[in-house]
Image: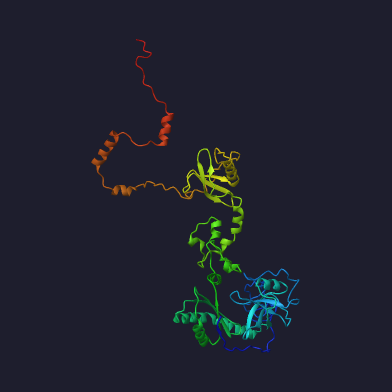
Amino acid sequence: MSDIVVDGETNQDQDFPPVRQDGCQDCLTGKVETCQSCGSGDEAPCASCGCPGRHAGSPRGKLFATNWLEGISDASDHELVEVQFKNTRKGYYRNSSHLDLHLGDIVAVEAAPGHDIGQITMVGKLVDLQIRKANLRPDHEFKKVFRIARPSDLEKFEEAKAREQDTMIRSRKIAESLHLNMKIGDVEYQGDGAKAIFYYIADERVDFRKLIRVLADTFHVRIEMKQIGARQEAGRIGGIGPCGRPLCCSSWMTGFVSVATSAARFQDLSMNPQKLAGQCAKLKCCLNFEVDTYMEASHALPHRDIPLETQDATYYHFKSDILGGQLTYSTDKHAPVNCVTISARRASEVIAANKRGEKVESLSDPNSLVAEKKEFVDLVGQDNINRFDKSKRRKKRKTSPNERAAQPQNPNGDKQRRDNQRRRPQQGPQQPEQKREQKQRPQRRQKDPYKNNPRN
């Protein structure tokens, strides 16, 4: 890591008393009872000055550990505290002044050069566990906590944060003009504005010595370059995953573990790069979440390469339901032909019988009861998409007397039409009412002229 140092000044003024940040952060009253907020970080007006203050309360976020020793161990019985800065950057500092520090306090800590502004995220004996998790040596030299941030410290800190966006845009143009194959993703200024950290992404090694000199001459601060990966950048940017939830790397994940394609093979996933890759163009981190469960469940399944012999045919493995413990076999090795789905226990029984030289009659378990599939019945008609449509019936329009008089009359044509209707037999389906009358009306029999004739 290369850097250029431009001297910065440390503000050591003691004109203002220290202000606790568990009160209103706009008017800096430092009174907890003056902020009408629930402590969750939601904005609410301050009762003392009316400004839209923010009650800091307990910090929340993906990098904050739960202080399960709250009320048992605090800053009074342990000197080390955990402080978090921007972009998931954390540090551990020694509270040599024995300040009364709590979660969420904004403090000024020692930096090289000057001081930095951060937030307390852990106090008490749990800091030792966090240090052990960070793989820091016991003889590590910890820097000091200067004080709880004063209003002058916060003003200078806000001024430095306001320059970050403009600095990032200008630094990208400088890197492009120097023809460097790198992307500057973010810029973080130190609390006193004397140092800037440039986070960049590069696929290969980049010689940015000239870039550092140009950035130092342009912004007049100390320059520090930090390389990050594509996953860290996606976690800082955020987004919505294919599952419909926020990205794990931007919501709750604190570390990144390497993901291999074997995790997808263990779960019988399709080896489609478009589906296996996330927004960072790397394999999805969620592939590692359930791989242990799948590996444990796969131990109860028989080997896939073993065919099953029956009296009718030979069955080969086609697919598996690992978590359900179901196996599907086909009579063809490469196509689903005469597929039969059986349990892992039944497959093991058939394999054991084949080893003894026996062939079973069928793969299905004779002792298993086949559950009848219940057919769906729409009792109330809610699944009919046309249930609210009205039947459209065309009604014959009645002509008014004026329209009849306006129509041209053709007596010869009307007479000819009536004669044709009389001669032509009625065709077409009869109306239901007429059919019903015909059924009810008995047919008349023709009289026999020779029956009951006295002359005969």
In the displayed structure, does residue 182 sit left or right of residue 323? left
Against 143, residue 69 (above or below) is: above
Query: Number of labelled discs?
Result: 0
Front position in the image: 29 or 201 = 201
Colour approach in the figure: rainbow
Residue at coordinates 26% horizontally, 40% vertically from top-left? Answer: 414
Q: Position of residue 436 (x, y in %)?
A: 43, 33
Which quadrant: the N terminus? Answer: bottom right
Against 43, residue 112 (above or below) is: below
Q: Position of residue 77 (x, y in %)?
A: 76, 76
Against 194, residue 348 (above or below) is: above
* Occupied quadrant, residue 35: bottom right
Q: Position of residue 303 (x, y in %)?
A: 56, 50
| Extreme-top residue of the structure | 455
Against 131, residue 445 (above or below) is: above
Front position in the image: 336 or 249 = 336
| Extreme-left residue of the structure | 412
Residue at coordinates 55% horizontally, 48% vertically from top-left? Answer: 327
Front position in the image: 272 or 205 = 205
In the displayed structure, does residue 392 sit left or right of residue 107? left
Front position in the image: 386 or 210 = 210
Which quadrant: the C terminus? Answer: top left
Q: Position of residue 347 (x, y in %)?
A: 58, 45
